[in-house]
Image (spheres, helix red, strand yellow):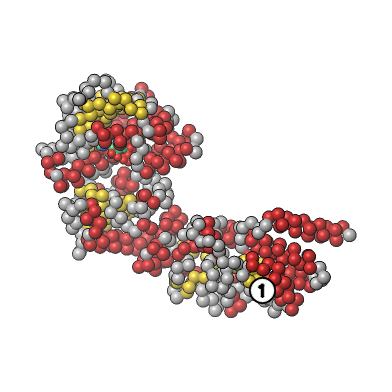
Amino acid sequence: MTTETAPETRSFEADVAKLLHLMVHSVYSDKDVFLRELISNAADACEKLRYEGLSNPALLGEDGQPRIAVTLDADNRQLIIDDNGIGMSEAEMAEALGTIARSGTKAFMEKIAGAKEAEGSQLIGQFGVGFYSAFMVADHVDVTSRRAGADSAATWSSDGLGTYTIAPADLADAPARGTRVRLHLKEEATAYTQRAMVERTIKAQSGHVPVPIFLKETPDAEPSQIADGAALWTKPKADVTAEEYQDFYRGVAGQFDDPAFTLHYRAEGLHEYTVLAFVPETRPFDLFDPDRAGRMKLYVRRVFITDEAQLLPRYMRFVRGLVDSNDLPLNVSREMIQESPVLAAIQKGVANRILSELDKLSSSDTDRYLKIWDNFGAVLKEGLYEDFTRRDALLGLARFKTTTSAGNWRSLKDYVASLRDNQTAIYYATGPDLDRLASSPQLEGFRARGIEVLLLTDQVDSFWVTGGVDYDGKPFKSVTQGLSDLSLVPLLEGEESAPAASDAVNGFVEFVKATLGDAVSDVRTSERLTESAVCLVAPDHGMDRQLEKLLAGAGRLDAGAKPVLEINPRHALIAKLAEADDGDAALREDAAHLLFDEARIADGELPVDPRAFSARLTRLLDRGLRSAVG
Ligand code: ADP
Ligand code: MG
């Protein structure tokens, strides 16, 4: 039974309705992005057909040339975008244009949830959000589509206000193949029926899509070509302007900033391929989205194959662009391509080249390089434990803030060049906050000896740094880990060396140990401390304290190893406590607990028992006041 009567009305998925509401009420001034989005969809559809046509040439029929046509109809205030690409069946239309499928749109919705209206419109420009952006300029949109090879067509139609209709379309009015998107423009969007405006916008935003674009000034006018569909990457580098690269980058990367770094080259020899890769200037929103591991597109002799070939290692997922291979077979399935040794060779070559180009950049244009590192260093460092073969290259690229760098980035080469006498390790401290890290008591002894300490604040740092890495034969050592051989390195001039701990101090240390019992694995005097009274470190062969906290926080570790409490024998308070009358056991007991809690607080933790902590503190203050007042 067929129903050629009234079209069926359906509701949008809730998230789409929300998104549409935003589009319809958008106050965003740069509405041009809708053209970029619709043309990119048309180009994608042509590329999908080109690919499916490889194994099924019948789909292409007589009409093998992909084409996008933009038609202006000022009389009816319409803008029409036609493509002869893969098209959509009725069911595909309902799915593609009624639900939120792609991760970018989801991420956009999550961001927008907390944003104010005005910020929302900024975000639209940033994300594009695809097809639905048409409703920024149109109060009604019709999409008529005929899937390649199908003998029926359908029309999707909506005013963007919560529902859409879908119905079979008359073949006589439908494209022979592909999709026609007809925008009934809002009054204030009449400018999009003017040739100069539309042509300029398309050339600027979409001049480098790999499908030729034609413009018709009126529905009956002759089409004229406004973009040639030539693949930019096949042109010699010398013929491509910075502007062309930038336009292309925005299209291929779905980013709306400028590339911070562009790499365009042709590999010859055993394998022939062309690479056009970009490092974005800003962090893409999906950098840490596990679904979007790689964003390099794979082409074979200019035919788009897939953007899921994992062309680069995960830790290079911020790189956008494409590789066009001459040697991969065109008629191989996407799944088979993944297994291909040719692909493996390309992967290796491209990843190595990108790293070596970044290394060159680090000396030829240091500022630019440091910006890249600032944005993506945390991602690249994942490679330090994921990719043993490129570890040295990555360590060479790595930059660090340190205790002596005054907020600037330092390389390990710099670090090693300024080692102190007898210093045999590269010291680091890890923690989420740079300022707090820089002032942690564990660093005092290092500072007194002029030893530079890397301040590591990225989550990933706790992982690679404990993976047995070394640089230039020097192991990485945490300042909170075990004994730190500090006494071998001479103190800076003007720093006093610690006197041997007196019997009284040793006695006090024993007392604290007995008092704290199981809460710590040891209590001992410290070489690390010069100003603070106490600090916590990991047991001699224990895990770095920061990593331990991370793992425990992620539920991947039951209970951490008990820390070691180190006590500064030179500290006036400790000396006094050590001399305190043995009879005053209650005071010394309170002090032992408070010292432990103080060390925990300096490490960003809570006192063991906040209530007991306040009671002890109150008792001590009370006592102090009474003796002060007399
Ligand atoms: P995206 O392009 O990122 O997938 P869009 O919102 O732009 O998101 O488009 C949603 C989906 O609608 C596309 O994935 C595609 O399946 C379908 N679509 C949109 N325009 C066309 C078109 N011109 N031809 C074929 N399919 C299209
Ligand atoms: Mg799209």
Q: Give me the residue at 24% from left, 40% from top.
A: 45
Q: Residue furthest front?
A: 1
Could you tell me if residue 47 is visible in this image?
yes
Residue sitting farthest toward the left: 62
**Amino acid type at mark 1:** Thr
Q: Is residue 213 above or below residue 379?
A: above
- Asked if one can make out residue 32 in the rendered structure from this viewpoint, the answer is no
**Residue 439 on image: x %, y %:** 61, 61
Q: Is residue 127 left or right of residue 580?
A: left
Residue situated in front as seen by the camera: 305 or 473:
305
- In the image, what residue occupies the spot 34% across and 40% down? 101
Foreground of the two, 131 or 553: 553
> How far across and down, in percent of the image, does residue 348 sit?
29, 62
Query: Image quadrant for the N terminus?
Result: top left
In this picture, residue 44 sits left or right of residue 584? left
Residue at numbered disc 1: 525
Residue 122, quarter of the rendered image:
top left
Quarter of the image where one finds residue 377:
bottom left
- Residue 140, image x and y in percent? 32, 25
Label 1 crowd bin: few (<14), some (14–19), many (20+), radius 10 Å: some
Q: Position of residue 103 (x, y in %)?
A: 37, 44
Where residue 437 sits, quadrant-wise, is bottom right
Residue at the image point whose x is 41% and y is 37% from the top: 124
Of 62 and 217, the residue lying toward us:
62
